[in-house]
Amino acid sequence: MSDALAPPTLPPLEGWVRVDDATDRPFELGPVSVVARTVVYEDAAIRERVPATADGPWRFLFASRLEIRPHTPPSKALTKLVGKRASAGFESRLGARGFSDVRRVESRTLRVRVGGGDETGSAGDGGTEAEADVVRYAATVELAGVELAADAYLAVTPVDGEFLLTGGAYPREVRGGDAETAAALREVIEPERFREELFRVIRRVG
């Protein structure tokens, strides 16, 4: 069977650049396999405002479309299993990007409108209402001798026999380090805006 799978669609992302688009099989459950199409974006605009020494992939977001093969009707058990595997994968992704001391802080559900927009800004058919399980993590990331506290979120949304995973991480505050670099970073860190932009994607991915 072909692994061809449409990428998830996201709302317009001004100042972001796509750095990865890949299809893989993240895990198998006996005769059942999971195929995932994942796109990853990094904040390119913010890099123009920080010292070159602090130019790192420390604000990113991703979205994945997961398809269960053969088709399996959604269930609480399957959703729980996918969520567990997705959390482990997300924590590994954070570690690969230099985030450390990753801690699960809280979880909640969120009403979202799946497919409510795409990268061209088209509203499409208005999307479909669904419920996402959202987990918030706290983490630490270091750039050019400056330690930053960071927030990260992962959303798992079952819809139409598939699963949509959406997540990302961003710096929340400067904890300390090289004074000049720390001052420059404080000027560009806007945690409320960062969070709003990430949740706009979570609410509109399709």
Image (tube, rainbow, N blue to C red):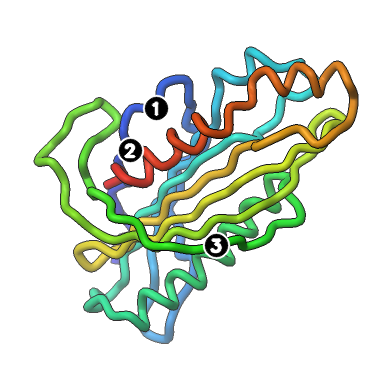
| Residue at the far left in the pictured view | 125
Q: Nearer the viewer, residue 146 or 75?
A: 146
Q: Which label sits in the foreground, 3 or 1?
A: 3
Image coordinates for residue 79, horizontal then vertical, percent: 36, 74
Q: Tag on residue 10?
A: 2
Classify 115 as above or below 74.
above
Q: Which mark is residue 174?
A: none
Q: Position of residue 118 (x, y in %)?
A: 25, 34
Taking 150 as reference, is 55 above or below it? above
Which residue occupies 30% across, 53% down?
Answer: 5
Is the residue marked by circle 3 packed among few (<14), some (14-19), or many (20+) residues within 10 Å?
Answer: few
User: On the rendered structure, is 115 left or right of 125?
Assistant: right
Q: Which residue is mark 3?
A: 106
Say which residue appears at 65% left-offset and 36% top-offset: 171
Give the SS element for disc 2. Answer: loop
Q: Looking at numbered disc 2 in the image, what kind of residue is underneath it?
A: Leu
Q: Name the residue at 61% across, 46% down.
A: 151
For this rendering, which residue is in front, 64 or 159? 159
Which residue position is annotated with label 1? 13
Q: Quadrant of residue 117?
A: top left
Instruction: Determine the residue located farthest toward the top in the rendered image.
Output: 48
Q: How many marks?
A: 3
